[in-house]
Image (spheres, rainbow, N blue to C red):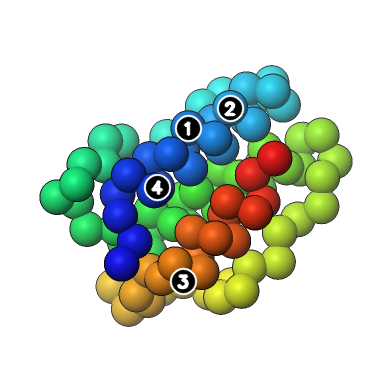
Amino acid sequence: MVKAVQLSELRQAVNAMRATAALGTASFTDPVLTGGVAVKATHVQELRTALAAARAAPGLAAVAFTDPTLTAGTTTVRAVHVQDLRTAVK
């Protein structure tokens, strides 16, 4: 099960990359994720979008995600989604 704290940590890492690339911080639908918040496909997709901009700015390659299509309300967030993001954050 993916935990809210995992996405919160990734948000911080992605925003650090965005700052290095002279981009503003990303805004998220649910700005504060706590232990009681269910992690949704929307949360992962927002991170992917913010990360894509952070990687594109300095010319880093786009990320090929294991499960490239996430559908809100349908896709169950899995550990592989978090791992893909962790691997892509540099």
- Residue at image mark 4: 7
Q: Residue at x 43, y 39 (%)?
A: 9
Residue at the extreme bottom of the image, as rendered? 74
Q: Residue at x 49, y 59 (%)?
A: 82
Which one is in front in this view, the residue at disc 2 or the one at disc 3?
2
Q: Residue at x 57, y 54 (%)?
A: 85
Instruction: Find residue 72 and report its image quarter.
Output: bottom left
Ranked by sequence position, the earlier of labels 3 and 4 is 4
Question: Mark 3: which secondary structure?
Answer: loop
Q: Is residue 23 visible?
A: yes
- Residue at image mark 1: 12
Distance of mark 2 from mark 4, alpha carbons? Answer: 14 Å
Question: Mark 1: which secondary structure?
Answer: helix
Q: Amino acid at mark 3?
A: Leu
Q: Amino acid at mark 1?
A: Gln
Sort mark 1 into few (<14), some (14-19) or many (20+) by Cα contacts within 10 Å.
few
Question: Mark 2: which secondary structure?
Answer: helix
